[in-house]
Image: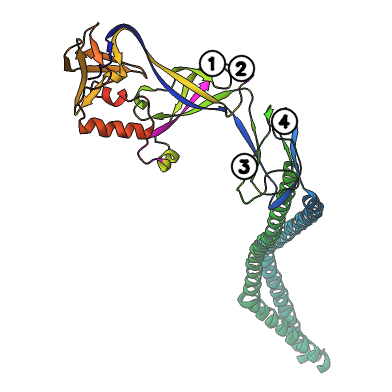
Amino acid sequence: MAEEQGAPVRRGPLRITVTASGNLAAADTVRLTSGVEGRTTILSLAPEGTQVRAGEVVCELDATTLVERRIQQTITAGNAEAALVKASQARAIQESQNLSDIEKAARTREFAGQDLAMFLEGERALELEKSQQTIDLAKEEAQRAQSRLNWSQELSSKGFLTSAELEADRISEHRSAVMLQQATRERELLERFRLPRREAELRALLFEAELERQRVELQAKARLVDFDSDVRSSTAELELEREKLARLERQIEHAKLRAPCDGYVVYAQRDSDEPPIGAGVEVREREEILAIPSSTGMRAELKLHESVLKQVEVGQACSLKIDALPGVELAGRVGFVAMLPDQNSRWSNPNLRVYRCEIEVTGAHLGLRPGMSCAVEIFIEELADALYVPVQGVHREGARTLCFVTDGRDVEPRTVLVGRYNELWVQVLHGLEEGETVLLEAPAGFAPAARESGRAGEEEAGVKGRPAERASAGGA
């Protein structure tokens, strides 16, 4: 029987860390896309990998068609502006005409009111007074003619007047009577018909003048509505044409892509059935042409197995070793831990659960480049005084966590309580004593189904930290 290999139970300081491998990426990457509508052609392009400064032109797109359209759009916008000026002036003219019409209608209404007031307060009384005076004069004239006729008849009876003179006085008296009768009837017609009719006419004229004033105001508003609509339409059309012109100006400006920050040029990757990015290649609107990773900061992108996920928190300190830079060790901190597992990894292996993690590189080195491989060690905890054994010495049997203790002759399976762990060591909280020896392999015949299925799953996932699941029984 081969001698079983063992390891002593140790006591001392223990650093709890999580290690993983990943790749460097720029902390800030600016992606430049085509801002020209439709499809256009790349005229010139900075060579890939070229160091550029902020503001430098890194790509120029063909804008010939846009320049021609801008000339035509400038003419269209000028015509729209002239139409707006014309519509605004026409409205101003109509507004002035409306004010004149409203003022005229208001004066007509005012004059009609004055005519009615003048009739009621003066003209009617004056007409009645004239009529009465005419009647009074007619009465006096009739009395005088009657007295003369009476006197003439007396003189004629005595033979002092001729019959012709008597007849003349009789005719004069008859004329005076007729004149009195006519004046009386004229007064009656004036009171019963003419004055009421005149009052009604004046009141009707006042009413009609008021209605006309209201009609003029409504017509003025109605006419202004049409002109206001023309002004709004012209304004909207001018804004639309100016927006089109501004869009063309922006697209012409966007035809020259400038570096927004210092960095180096990285061409965008296209589908396999499309030609690679380069001068003379046609690109679509909003299609990515190139990217400029910032040279001022780096981050490490890695994936953590679910068994160590609960130990990692944002803000924990890290150290990074770059494969391409031997001897270089950089400081960092955990900046992001995903809440959900990585979908791409699940497609490749449905049993694998890994989570994206980003490490902010706080150290700097001139040789850092995006895409470089790196190893990251995340510092979880420093245990000043811990009892610990190698990870190979801890085993699972159902819900039990076991260590096989040996004195060189006999092997004793012992239930233990474990705590923190790293890639090499597991903290033992209870069940072992310092100096005891534990087997690194389970003795022959110890092969519980739970342990074997767990080992197979771990090997399939390619995980080094197998004690994580063993330690879960003791808590982390």
- Total marks drawn? 4
Quadrant (top left/top right/bottom left/bottom right) for the C terminus: top left
N-terminal label among 2 and 3:
3
361 falls in the magenta region: yes
N-terminal label among 4 and 3:
4
- The relative height of residue 192 versus residue 227 in the rendered view (above or below) is below
The residue that label 4 is drawn on is 50
Does residue 123 appear in the picture of this structure? yes
- Check contact, mark 1 vs mark 2: CB within 8 A: yes
Other-residue count near label 3 (Cα within 10 Å), few / some / many at <14 / 14–19 / ≥20: few
Other-residue count near label 4 (Cα within 10 Å), few / some / many at <14 / 14–19 / ≥20: few
Classify residue 159 as left or right of residue 103.
right
Mark 2 residue element? loop
Q: Camera-side residue: 303 or 143?
A: 303
Mark-to-mark CA distance, 1 and 2: 8 Å
N-terminal label among 4 and 1:
4
Quadrant (top left/top right/bottom left/bottom right) for the N terminus: top left
Look at the image and give the residue range highlighted in magenta. Answer: 349-367
The residue that label 1 is drawn on is 330
Residue drawn at the location 76% of the way across and 91% of the way down: 157
Other-residue count near label 1 (Cα within 10 Å), few / some / many at <14 / 14–19 / ≥20: some
The residue that label 3 is drawn on is 269
The residue that label 2 is drawn on is 365
Across and down, in percent, residue 399 comes to 19, 27
Mark 2 belongs to which amino acid? His
- The relative height of residue 379 versus residue 67 in the rendered view (above or below) is above
Mark-to-mark CA distance, 2 and 3: 28 Å
Mark-to-mark CA distance, 2 and 4: 19 Å
Figure quadrant of residue 256: top right
Mark-to-mark CA distance, 4 and 3: 17 Å
Across and down, in percent, residue 305 comes to 38, 29
Mark-to-mark CA distance, 4 and 1: 26 Å
